[in-house]
Amino acid sequence: MGVTLGKEGRVKVGGVTLAEMRSFRISETETAADRSTLEDKWDRIAGNTANWNASLTVWWDPTANGQTGLKRGDAPALIFYPQGTTAGKKYRQGDALVTSVEINVARDNHVEATVQVQGNGELQELTVGA
């Protein structure tokens, strides 16, 4: 089984490749509904609802490709390519709401921004075509 290097990862915002990308994280959650009865010794659960969120970290440049669509309150279509964009690789896409933008300024580093998004509907898993 191969290992994927993080440098292969890409994110598109509204179809535009996000510039100055440092890292990203995607989290998918399935909530569990308890269907146990009083007689059950062990919990019995069933999947109930699903949601997703993501965090994007970039070298902050409000004029850079893709970053212009990542302001608090924006609702971008996002595509996440954890393994890169070559044919046969898996990727995820979905609509989101930008819930927060944090700008970090440090004397000994470049200005960095972390953008938090909450999924609005399904996060689809697809395969890059030829």
Image (cartoon, rainbow, N blue to C red):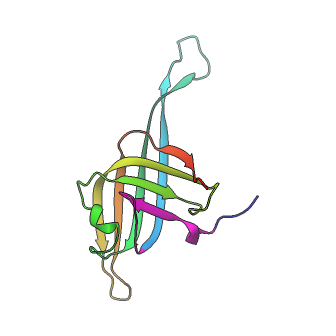
Query: What residue is shown at x 49% (from left), y 36% (from top)?
Result: 30
> Relative to the observer, which residue lies in front, 124 or 128?
128
Identity of the residue furthest to the left in this view: 73
**Percent of width and height locating residue 58:** 39, 71
Q: Which residues are magenta?
A: 5-20
> Relative to the observer, which residue lies in front, 67 or 109?
67
**Percent of width and height locating residue 89:** 62, 56
Query: What residue is shown at x 54% (from left), y 45% (from top)?
Result: 125
In which quadrant of the rendered image does the N terminus lie?
bottom right
Query: What residue is shown at x 36% (from left), y 66% (from top)?
Result: 114
Based on the picture, tell me whether residue 40 belongs to the magenta stretch. no
Check the image and report above or below for 105 versus 93: below
Check the image and report above or below for 59 versus 102: below
Instruction: Locate residue 13 relative to residue 69 in the image: left or right.
Output: right
In which quadrant of the rendered image does the C terminus lie?
bottom right
Identity of the residue furthest to the bottom in this view: 108
**Percent of width and height locating residue 107:** 33, 88
- Quarter of the figure with residue 84: bottom right
Q: How many marks?
A: 0
Instruction: Locate residue 94 relative to residue 40 in the image: left or right.
Output: left
**Percent of width and height locating residue 127:** 59, 50
Instruction: Locate residue 7 relative to residue 111 in the image: left or right.
Output: right
Check the image and report above or below for 28 versus 59: above
Based on the picture, tell me whether residue 18 belongs to the magenta stretch. yes
Identity of the residue furthest to the right in this view: 1
Identity of the residue furthest to the top in this view: 39
> Relative to the observer, which residue lies in front, 100 or 67?
67
Check the image and report above or below for 116 versus 18: above
